[in-house]
Every structure is written in C-alpha cells, then in structure tokens.
Amino acid sequence: MSKAKILIVDDEPQLRRVISTTLVASGYTVEQARTGEEALNRLREQKYDLVLLDLNMPGIGGLETCREIRWSSDVAIIILSVRNSEKDKVQALDAGADDYVSKPFSSPELLARIRAALRRLPVSPDSGSQVLVLGNVTVNFLQRRVSAGDKEIRLTPKEFDLLQYLANNPDQPVPHRKLLQAVWGPDYGDEVEYLRVFINQLRKKIEPDPSHPAYILTEPWVGYRLHAS
C-alpha cells in the first residue's frame, strides 16, 4: 500500500533529518522546507498529504503559515511546538491545524499522530445517509463535498469527518470521548479543546447563525448532537 507524501517544515536541520529518517523508514515520501515561505511555495507547486509544521520559525512563523495553507488547501496539518499550554493548542487548531504535538516527542508518538491525522471515516451504504441537507447546505459524503447553493464550502478533513460521524448518529448525543476516538483514533479521548475548536469552525461554515446553532447542538457536560430533522 502506498504511503502518504509529507512535508516537514522546521528551521532546525538536525530535527528535520531525524524526523525525515523516521518517516522514510516507515514508508512515507518526505520533503523538507526551512521556512514558512518555502513551504507555501512548495505547496503551490505540488500536492502533499500532510504537513508537519514547526510553530516557532523566522519569517512569517508557524501560525501564519498554517492559516495561509488552510486558506487554499485541505491538507492535513500537525503543529510541532515546545509550547504546551491549552491556549497555544487552541490557537493552532483555530488557525487550521488538525493536531498539535509538543516537543520533545518520541518517534512512535509522532507516527501515531500522523496516522491519526491521515485517517478518514469510510462511507458505506450501511453507514447512514450519503447526502445530508441542512437548510440550504448540502453535504455529499461519498464525494466529500459541501455546498450552499452553487457555492462550495471548504471543510478540513477532520471537520468533514466530525460532521459525518454526527450525521451517522442523528439526533443522538455523542459523547466527547466517542467523537474524538471515532475521528482521531483510539489514542484520543481527553482532548476536549480539539472538539470545541472544530465544532466552532464547523458552525461558522454551515450554520445560518453560528452563535445560535440550529443543527450542531451542544449537549452540556456530554458532547454534541446533530439536529437533522
């Protein structure tokens, strides 16, 4: 089975070499960039499946690079950083990252995070409706496309998978842990701040009034529920 193509973006040559060696040994195709500007140029020229992005870099910096990437691409993004506060994680996720890994990290941890970022929920005839209509928003799960009238709405892969999982369990409260493990994988469950950020982003994209959601509802102290009727 072919592996994903990964772009490592970090201004530390030694760290890039170590990560690259680990990923190549695991069967991934790897390229490197030293700065955010170089990464953006590479992403304009070719397609990657995942970007490992350092937060602290000279030039435009990791957060701004993440925002720029997410503006035009749904590539998976994992932020790498020595910072470990919830505020830093929320800022990175809000900028469009799919995950956040604190330095120092082990090779097995990084590989597990990469697998989680690349995982996609399958769509099968038995997994629920393949088309979801929420007001003027139409979601085609088979094509992984979302539109409002003739305007396409860009969802990140994790935003899409969250919406898909909620749609497969309509009008049922889905606990935080269950959502996290379904979308990111079994190693997740306590990263409730991830869900808050991604749900907020989803609401901004598909709700008529994100501050008073009609479709993606919060179940206090439990999780979230999709009101699809």
Image: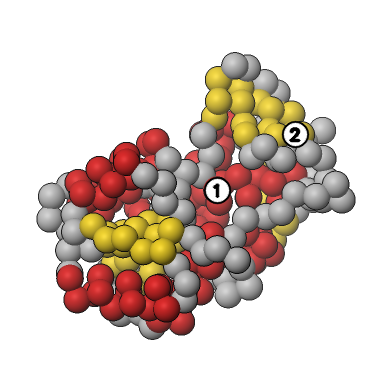
Quadrant for residue 133, please give it.
Answer: top right
Q: Residue furthest top?
A: 150
Camera-near label (1 vs 2) is: 1
Q: Amino acid at mark 1?
A: Pro
Q: Classify the position of the N terminus by image quarter.
A: bottom right
Location of residue 40 with respect to 182 vertically, above or below: above
Query: Within 10 Å of the Cα at label 1, are there few (<14), some (14-19), or many (20+) other Cα atoms?
Result: many
Q: Quarter of the image holding residue 9?
A: bottom left
- Position in image of residue 119 (x %, y %): 59, 60
The single residue placed furthest to the front in the displayed view is: 1
Rendered position, 134 above or below 218 = above
Give the residue displayed 69% in from the left and 46% down from the top.
164
Residue type highlighted by circle 2:
Leu
Q: Which SS class for mark 1?
A: helix
Badge 2 element: strand
State the residue in front, 213 or 139: 139
- Residue name at image x 12 percent, y 55 percent: 58
Residue 178: percent from left, percent from top? 69, 64
The answer to whether residue 79 is visible is: no
Residue pointed to by mark 2: 132
Q: Of label 1 and label 2, which has the lower sequence position?
A: 2
Give how far apart the Cα atoms at labels 1 and 2 are.
17 Å
x, y percentage for residue 55?
Answer: 26, 60
- Farthest residue to the left: give it: 58
